[in-house]
Amino acid sequence: MVFDSALSYTLFIHALVGVFVIVNPFGNIPIFISLTSKLTPAERRTAIIKSLLIATAILLVFALIGQAVFTLLNVTLPSLRIAGGLLLLAIAFDMLMGRSPASKIDESDEREAVAVTPMATPLLAGPGAMSTVMILMNEAATNDLQKLSIFLAILLAMGAAFLILINSELLYSVIKKDGSRVLTKIMGIVLATIAIEMMVNGLLKAFPVLAGMGI
């Protein structure tokens, strides 16, 4: 029971930190401001709320069906950890190098559609966040307490992102562009650490002989 509680707590922390860092609300502030520059303050607030709700729903759905999908595809947890770690490492590298998804955004999209794409996905609920929640849910297996802790972590992480993004103009006036870049790079380092740990655990499970070599 104590072990289960400790593991649930560990998964909760991994999910909370992982989802929040990948969603990267501080780094998305200037992007969101740019995307909603032609909207009124009320429309901007509505767009941010809509994008957060959609992104949260996407992550919860992937957390729910992820295990079933990978069971159907006969994908093992170690393989998922390695693949997910590689994907997160690529995202972390982009964050550290200052490359942003904003370069791929078409700002001529319809005003109403921008809340769905690209704000909700891929900026908030992108491949990295989706794979992270699926990996954690697969680790939880059939333990309901652990699954509940992951769902709670997703809701808390997205709630924190909501508070930051809904006050994006105020925060941007304080941290400015340079502050946003610094915070993004810090999050990139944290995400790279999570990605490497994920890959190492996957490799050790896929190739147990590595553990005997002291890796």
Image: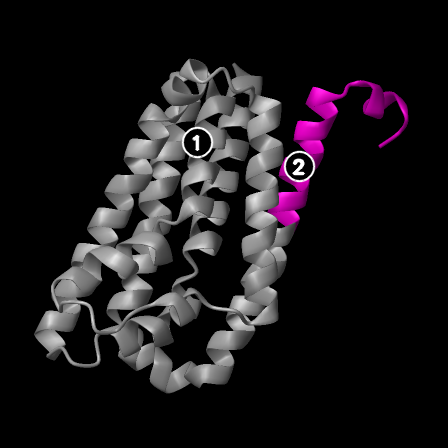
Image height of 49 relative to 125, above or below: below
* Disc 1: which residue: 134
Give the label on residue 199, or none: 2
* Residues rendered magenta in the picture: 193-215
Q: Is residue 207 covered in magenta? A: yes
Which amino acid, mark 1?
Answer: Met
**Residue for point 16% across, 64% down:** 47
Does label 1 or label 2 sit earlier along the sequence?
Answer: 1
Which residue corresponds to the image point at 49% horizontal and 27% vertical from the top-left? Answer: 8
Q: Residues within 10 Å of mark 2 (few under 14, many from 20)?
A: many
Q: Is residue 29 left or right of residue 70?
A: left
Whether residue 83 is visible here, answered yes or no, is: yes
Residue 38, horizontal then vertical, whole percent: 16, 81
Left or right of residue 71: residue 55: left
Determine the residue located farthest toward the right in the rendered image: 213
Q: Position of residue 213 (x, y in %)?
A: 90, 26
